[in-house]
Image (cartoon, grey):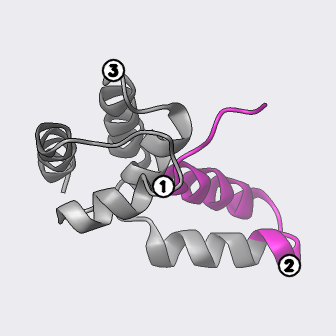
Amino acid sequence: MAEPVPLARVKQLLTEEASRRTLPREAALALAHAEGFAKLEAEDAEKLVVELRALPFVDAGLATKIADALPQYPEEIRLLFSKERVVLDEEQIAKLLELTAQHR
C-alpha cells in the first residue's frame, strides 16, 4: 500500500505540475480542494507527520490525518481515532494537541 501524503504536499505537487501544463479536470479539482483546506506548508506538514509517527500509538494514516486537520480540542483527536482500535488516555491526547499547536 502507498504511503499517505499530507494535503499540503498534494497542493505543492499539483501547483508545480500546473505551472508546467494544464491539469486534467480531476487534478484541477484536487488542487482547488488542497488550496482551500491545506493549513500548513508542505515541509511543515511532513515534519509534523514525522514527529507524530515517533509516537507508538500513531500510524502513518493517522499522522497524515492529524497533520491535515490540525486538531485544537480533545474531541477532535477522539474523532480522528474513533475508527481505530486504540483508546487514548488524556496524556496521549495532550501530547498530540501539544505537537499540533507547535505547528500552527
Say which mark, if any, is on residue 54. Answer: 3
Q: Secondary structure at mark 1?
A: helix
Judge left or right: residue 48 versus residue 21: left
Whether pointer 2 and pointer 3 mark residues with C-beta atoms closer than 8 Å, the reply is no
Say which mark, if any, is on residue 37. Answer: none
**Residue 39 visible in rendering:** yes
Judge left or right: residue 4 versus residue 51: right
Question: Which x, y percent locates residue 90?
Answer: 13, 45
Residue 100 or residue 27, whichever sits in front: 100
Q: Is residue 24 magenta?
A: yes
Say which mark, if any, is on residue 25. Answer: 2
Residue at 64 percent across and 50 percent down: it is: 13
Q: How many marks?
A: 3
Quarter occupied by residue 91 = top left
Image position of 43 with respect to 11: above or below: above
Disc 3 to disc 1, how far (Cα)?
20 Å
Question: Which x, y percent locates residue 69?
Answer: 38, 62
Amino acid bearing label 1: Ala
Q: Quadrant of the C terminus?
A: bottom left
Report the predominant secondary structure element of the magenta stretch. Answer: helix
Q: Secondary structure at mark 3?
A: loop
**Residue 70 visible in rendering:** no
Residue 36 or residue 17, whichever sits in front: 36
Disc 1 to disc 2, how far (Cα)?
19 Å
Q: First in sequence: mark 1 or mark 2?
A: 1
Judge left or right: residue 26 versus residue 11: right
Say which mark, if any, is on residue 8. Answer: 1
Residue at 19 percent across and 61 percent down: it is: 74
Residue 50 or residue 13, whichever sits in front: 50
The magenta segment is 1-27
